[in-house]
Image (spheres, coloured by chain):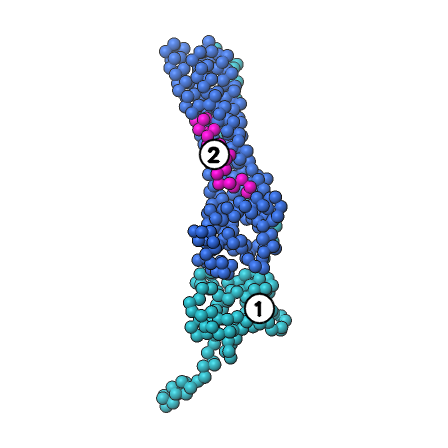
């Protein structure tokens, strides 16, 4: 019985295996960021399994249903680039992305591009006074007053 | 007062004035070092309109040398035991004291404006880098030099170029997320891994921010002018108090 199950399992078509798709993670993948305002940095399909094959990346800008495609060639091992850069996107928009190589597809990845803050909104006013500045100002002001007092005393009260 | 005590006081005044003269000359030299700006960061303060660290350095050049000359005059006045000369010395020293106070306080205050936190430097970089105005060219050259010298990118990190809108993004944003000066370079100045740098590979670009370098240089200039100026002023204060006592004992 068990042998039958194993044989059936071995005959299972490999089409059901899925290509992994994800956005690169700054902490684990050695990149600065995976999600940019106008692009995504996606993990490339495995170079040993899919090297040198032509692949397609299908992406949809939600909420529309218009399918867009980017064709590229999966680089052979060893790979120099950390991932595939999908460019030309709009900031603050959600996209659904899928890889398609030969007849295999990956799961659908849903990610949103980051929004960009205008630099005019950075508050560049005085943040705070440092301790050094307060000490120097206070002590020097006292010294100036003491010197004025000393000068007046030495001019008018000397014997 | 006894003649011996008066002589003792005269010697103390002469010694203190000699040391103050040397300290004043050193202040003159240090202030010249700040004014020369070896790290060439002056555009960062001039474009924001807050260049008083360098103005304070110029004042300190004047007051340092004036302290030197006046203290030598003070030694001469003390030796001659002349009341008139000593009074002239005291008044001139007091005026120089006031100017030097102004220099020390100005430098310390302006440093707080510029590098208290990274906001001003960051906003300036985003606004003026790659701008074609005169200010833009100055800032672009300065930042290019800083990025190469300190091996850094952005103010706090390269993510500043991603999180904020900037003149650079409007001009080159579709091709480059950040300037190519952020990329690792070989010893012959060529970019080591251009594609990796554009994509953000950590090993192909500089990931630390430039604010720490800029802050440390401007702080070093400020401490040279304001803390050393403060130290000289405290010593001159002591000298003046003892000179006033000596003046009051003369007849």
Dot 1, how many residues are within 10 Å of its Cα: few (below 14), some (14-19), or many (20+)? many
| Res. B207 visible in picture | no
Asked whether A141 or B78 is in front, the reply is B78
Q: Please identify the dominant SS of the magenta region.
A: helix
The image shows residue A40, relative to residue B210, as above or below, that is below
* Rendered location of residue B88, percent (x, y): 51, 16
Is label 1 in a helix, a strand or a loop? strand
The image shows residue B120, relative to residue B37, as above or below, that is below
Chain letter for mark 2, please. Answer: B
* Rendered location of residue A43, percent (x, y): 48, 68
* Rendered location of residue B251, percent (x, y): 46, 9
Q: Give the residue at x 48% y 27%.
A: B64
Asked whether B108 or A153 is in front, the reply is B108
Q: Give the residue at x 59% y 64%.
A: A88
Q: Which residue in the protein does label 1 denote?
A: A95
Looking at the rendering, in which quadrant would you find the N terminus of chain B?
Answer: top left
* Rendered location of residue A48, percent (x, y): 42, 73
The image shows residue B238, relative to residue B248, as above or below, that is below
Dot 2, how many residues are within 10 Å of its Cα: few (below 14), some (14-19), or many (20+)? some
Q: Give the residue at x 54% y 57%.
A: B177
Chain letter for mark 1, please. Answer: A
Q: Provide the letter of the chain coloured cyan.
A: A
Question: Which region is colored magenta?
Answer: B23-44
Residue B138 falls in image quadrant: top right
Image disc number at residue A115: none
For discs 2 and 1, the disc positioned in front in the rendered view: 2
* Chain B on-screen colour: blue
| Res. B62 visible in picture | yes
Q: Give the residue at x 51% y 49%.
A: B155
Q: Which residue in the protein does label 2 denote?
A: B33
Q: Are marks 2 and 1 in contact (CB under 8 Å)?
A: no
């Amino acid at each position: 019985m068990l042998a039958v199950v194993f044989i059936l399992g071995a005959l299972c078509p490999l089409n059901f295996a899925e290509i992994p798709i994800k956005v690169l993670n700054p902490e684990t993948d050695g990149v600065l960021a995976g999600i940019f305002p106008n692009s995504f940095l996606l993990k490339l399909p495995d170079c040993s399994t899919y090297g040198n094959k032509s692949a397609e990346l299908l992406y949809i800008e939600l909420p529309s249903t218009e399918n867009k495609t980017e064709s590229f060639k999966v680089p052979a091992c060893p790979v120099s680039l950390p991932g595939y850069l999908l460019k030309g996107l709009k900031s603050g928009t959600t996209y659904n992305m899928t890889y398609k190589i030969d007849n295999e597809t990956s799961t659908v990845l849903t990610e949103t591009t980051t929004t960009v803050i205008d630099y005019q909104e950075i508050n560049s006013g005085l943040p705070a006074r440092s301790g050094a500045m307060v000490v120097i100002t206070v002590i020097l002001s006292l010294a100036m007053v003491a010197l004025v007092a000393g000068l007046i005393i030495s001019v008018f009260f000397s014997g | 007062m006894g003649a011996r005590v008066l002589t003792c006081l005269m010697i103390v005044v002469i010694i203190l004035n000699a040391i103050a003269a040397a300290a004043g000359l050193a202040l003159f030299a240090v202030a010249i070092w700040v004014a020369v700006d070896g790290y060439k960061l002056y555009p960062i303060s001039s474009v924001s309109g807050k260049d008083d660290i360098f103005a304070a350095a110029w004042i300190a050049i004047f007051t340092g040398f004036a302290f030197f000359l006046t203290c030598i005059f003070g030694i001469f006045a003390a030796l001659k035991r002349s009341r008139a000369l000593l009074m002239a010395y005291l008044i001139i020293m007091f005026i120089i004291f006031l100017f030097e106070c102004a220099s020390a306080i100005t430098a310390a205050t302006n440093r707080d404006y510029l590098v208290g936190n990274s906001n001003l430097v960051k906003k300036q970089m985003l606004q003026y880098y790659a701008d074609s105005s005169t200010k833009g060219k100055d800032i672009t050259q300065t930042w290019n030099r800083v990025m190469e010298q300190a091996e850094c990118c952005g103010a706090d990190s390269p993510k500043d170029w991603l999180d904020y809108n900037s003149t650079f993004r409007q001009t080159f944003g579709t091709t480059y997320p950040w300037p190519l000066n952020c990329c690792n370079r070989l010893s012959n100045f060529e970019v080591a891994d251009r594609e990796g740098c554009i994509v953000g590979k950590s090993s192909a670009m500089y990931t630390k921010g430039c604010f720490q370098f800029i802050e440390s240089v401007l702080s070093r200039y400020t401490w040279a002018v304001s803390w050393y100026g403060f130290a000289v002023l405290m010593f001159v204060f002591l000298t003046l108090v003892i000179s006033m006592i000596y003046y009051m004992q003369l007849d």
